[in-house]
Image (cartoon, rainbow, N blue to C red):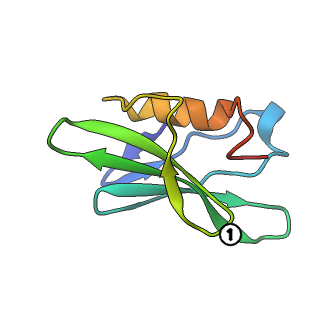
Amino acid sequence: MVRRTGARARPPPSPSRVRDRPTTPHDRRAARSLARGLRPEWTNFPIARLRYTATDKSWTLYWRDRNLRFHIYDLLAPSNRVDDLLTELDRDPTGIFWG
C-alpha cells in the first residue's frame, strides 16, 4: 500500500516480520513507477515497473529480466487499484521479483 503525503507517494512502515527482506522504495516518474530492491550491500536495482494507463485508468505490473528489460506480468490483470499490484509484488508467488 502506498500512502500519500503532499505530492509524494511513500510506502508504509515495514512490519517487524519483513524488516530483513529487501525494501521497495517507489520512484514515480511520469506515468510509471519502479519498485527498487535495496539489499543489505546497499546496491540499488529495479525489480518491477508499475505503469499507469490514463485512457482506461489502470495500472499494469511489469517484471525485469536479467538483461534489464521489462515484460508484462501476465498472472495479474491490469487494475484500477495500485494496491493490488503492490500486494502481488510483495506476495511474489512465482519468485520472479524477489527470487
Q: Is 56 on the left or on the right of 21, as rendered? A: left
| Residue 65 screen position, x and y as percent | 63, 59
Find the residue positioned furthest to the left.
Answer: 55
In the foreground, 96 or 46: 96
- Using the rendered view, name the quadrant where residue 32 is placed: bottom left
Please tell me which residue lies in front, 62 or 31: 62
36 sits left or right of 26 in the view = right
Return the x and y of residue 47 as percentages of the image width and height.
62, 56
* Residue depicted at 46% across the width and 31% down the height: 83
**Looking at this view, is 5 or 37 the one in front?**
37
Residue at the image point whose x is 63% and y is 40% from the top? 13
Q: Is label 1 in a helix, a strand or a loop?
A: strand
Q: Which residue is mark 1?
A: 44
Q: Quadrant of residue 68?
A: bottom right
Residue drawn at x 28%, y 36% as measured from the top left: 58
On the image, the x and y values in percent for residue 45 come to 65, 67
Q: Is residue 78 above or below residue 37?
A: above
Q: Is residue 41 above or below residue 63?
A: below
**21 over 90 or under it: above or below:** below
Is residue 31 rendered to the left or right of residue 24? left
Asked if residue 3 is positioned above or below residue 80 in the image, the reply reads: below
Q: Tell me: 38 left or right of 6.
A: right
- Name the one closer to the observer, 92 or 21: 92
- How many marks on residues? 1
Residue sitting at 85 percent across and 69 percent down?
Answer: 41
**Badge 1 density bin: few <14, some 14–19, many ≥20, Cα 10 Å:** few
Q: Amino acid at mark 1?
A: Asn
